[in-house]
Image: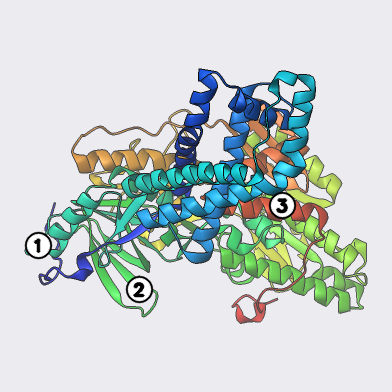
Amino acid sequence: MEGTPAGAPVAHSTLDEPRVNFSLRREVAFVVVGSLAGAVLMHASQIYATVIGGNDYLRTLLVMARIIGSGEPAAGFAFHILVATVIGIVVGVVLYRAFGVSLSRLRNGVLYGLGVGMVVLVAFAIPVSMAVIAPAAAGLVSEDPSMAAPRPEPAVAITDSAISHAIWGVTAGTVATALTRRLGANYRCHRCDIEFSKRPTYAEHVSRMHGSGAPLLRRILVLGGGYAGIGVLRRLQREFEDSVDTSITIVSEDNFFLSTPLLAEMATGHVEPRHISTPIRTFCRRARYYHASVESIDLDGRSVMIRRTVDGKAVEMRYDHLVLALGGQTNYYGNSSVEEHALTIRTLEDALALRNRIITMLEGADQEDGAAEQESMATFVVVGGGFSGVETAGAIHDFVTESAERYYRNIEPSAVRVVLVSAGPILPEIGELGPYAERAMGRRGVEIIKGAKLVEASPHAATLDNGKIIPCMTIVWAGGVRASPVVAALDAEHGAGGRVSVNECLQVAGRPEVHALGDCAHLVNARTGRPYPPTAQNAIRQAAVAAHNVASAVRGRGSQRRFDYASAGSMAMIGRRDGVAVLFGLRLRGVLAWLLWRNYYLSRLPSAEKRLRVAIDWLVDLYVPSDVTRLGNILDRRRRP
C-alpha cells in the first residue's frame, strides 16, 4: 500500500458540504412503509370504537371488501390501503420527476403528506363514494339490515374524512422522510465524484482526503467496461461502500456498457441502439470513471498508462490491485484481405455499420437492372459457425427477406441470398441440436457451407479454400476473438489468441495483485481440458469470483475463491421465433427456445429501465414491420462496398 498525494491542503469551506442524492426507488419503498403506519394511526380511533361496541368501521371494511368481490373485512382493509398507497406513490413520483421534489426534508414530507391525503380524499369522497361505495353499502344493508346506520350530514362526513386522510398523509410523509434521511441518502464528494451511504463516512473521507497530509489508500483499478469489468465494479462498490481507505477507479474507452449478445438484434432493427447501451457513469457511485484508452501496463511498477479520449493526453495511474477486463478484438488470423473488406459485429459501431451496409445494398439492388449485379448486392456472406455467426446470419436473413418483400419490390426473390460459411460443424457447443439448427436455418432459406474457410475477401466476392467463389458485396466475419495488443504485450504467460493465462482464482501467474477475466483471460476448464470460451455468460460468472478475491486481498483475509463453472446450458437464436437451447441437459428448440433466449438476455440487462425499453422494442417488433432507415453514412467508414 502506497501513499497517494491528494494535492495541496484545502481549507474547509462550503465545498466540504456533500451533494446529497436520494434514491427514488428507496423513497417509493419508504412511502409504502409510511402509508401502512399512517393507515394504522388513521383508523386507530375507528377500530377502538368498533371493538368497544359499534360496527361502523366493520361496515366500512365490508363495503370495501364487496368492491373486490370478497366478504372478509381484512380484504377491505388491504384494498383501501393498497389504493391509497398507489396514489401516494404516483403523486410522489410525479413530484420527483417533474419538480425534483424529494422527501429529504421534513417540510417536504409534511406538505407531500397533506397533498396526497387530499388527493385520496377527493378520489374517494366524491366520485368513488358516489359511483362505487354507495351502491356497495346499499347492497350490504339489504343483505344484513343490522349493518344499517344513520347517515351523517354531508359536511360532517367530509370533514371527518378530511381529518382522517390528513392524519394518514402526514404520517406517511413524515415516516417516509425520516427513513429517507436515515437510509435513502447518498453523500457525494464534489472533488472526488464518489458517493457514501453514511454521512459520518463522508466526513471521514473529507478529513482523510482533503485535510492536511497525504492519505494512504488501497487503490483498485479496473480496466474495461464490459460484462466482466462492470460486474466486478458493481460488486466492489457494494463491498467497499463505506470504506474511506479504499479507492476504486474504472477506465474504459467506451463510456457505455454494451449488451453484446443483442448486437445482431440491433443491427437488424429489432432493438434500438441506446436501449442496449448503458452509460458507465450510472454504475459509478463509489468509483471514479475515466473515459480513456489503455496504452500500456507495467506489472513490475504497478502502473497503467492511459490516454484520455477528450484531448489525447497521456496519464499514468498507479494501483495496488489491478483487474484486467479489457475484452477482446476480432481475430483475422493474419488475413489482411478479410480485415480490409469484411465487416464484424463486436461493437455498437460494427452493428450500426452492418445495418447501414445491408440497407445500402438493398437500395442499390432495387435500382439495378442487371441480374448478376443485383444478386451480388443482395448476397450476404457470414463467416463463422458459432453463436455469433449463426445468430447474425439468422437475423440478417429475416431482415433482408422481409424488407425486400415489403419495400424493395424490384429485387427478385431469388436474388436474395444469405450464406453461412463454417470451417466445422454448426453450433458444436450444443451437440445434437446443431444439426437441428442447420436444418431449421436451411428451411428458412439460409445457405450453409460447412468444412470451408474464407481465404480471400474482396469488394465483390468471397473466395473459399474449396475453390468456391461467392459473388457478394457484403461479408460479415464472426470467425474468432483475440486479446487486445495491450494484453498480448504483458510480461506474463499467454494462451491462445494472446490472452493472458490465469489460475483458478483468476490471478495472473506470479502476480497475485492482478486478476484477469472475460475475453482477455485464458483459463483451462479442469472438467473438459479446454479453455473457457469468451462468452458473456462466463464473463458474468467470473466477475463474481474476481470481485470476491480482490475484496479478500484488499481486506487481508487471504481467502481466494476458485472459478469452477459447469455450464447449465447454452442457447442460440436462429431466426424469428426459432431457437435452440440445452438447459440442464434438457434439449429445447423452436419458439420455446427462442423465448428462453430472449428472457435470459433481457434479464442480463443492467437496469429495469433498459429491460423495459427492450421488452417494448420486442413487443412493437411483433406487430410493426422492419424499419429500413439508414443511420449515418457508411461512406464515412474505411470499409466501403
Tell me the kind of residue under disc 2.
Arg
Residue position marked by numbered label 3 in the rendering: 618
Three-letter code, disc 3: Trp
In the rendered image, the vertical position of residue 291 relative to residue 283, given as above or below: below
The mark nearer the N terminus, 2 or 3, is 2
- Residue appearing at x 30%, y 39% in the figure: 549
Q: CA distance from mark 1 to mark 3?
A: 53 Å
Residue that mark 2 sits on: 308
Would you say residue 394 is visible in this rendering? no
The quarter holding residue 171 reads top left
Pointer 1: what residue? Answer: 214
Tell me where residue 434 appears, x and y as whole percent: 71, 37
Mark 2 or 3: the one toward you:
3
Is 136 placed left or right of 275 in the picture? right
Q: Report whether 66 appears left or right of 509.
A: right
Mark 1 or mark 2, which is nearer to you? 1
Q: Residues within 10 Å of mark 2 (few under 14, many from 20)?
A: some
Image location of residue 504, percent across then percent down = 35, 35
Q: Is residue 433 left or right of residue 291?
A: right
The crowd level at tag 1 (other Cα within 10 Å; few <14, some 14-19, many 20+) is: some
For this rendering, which residue is in front, 190 or 430?
Answer: 190
Query: What amino acid is at disc 1?
Result: Ala
Could you say which is closer to the camera, residue 403 or residue 175? 175
Of labels 1 and 3, earlier in sequence is 1
Q: Quadrant of the C terminus?
A: bottom right
Q: Is residue 639 visible?
A: yes
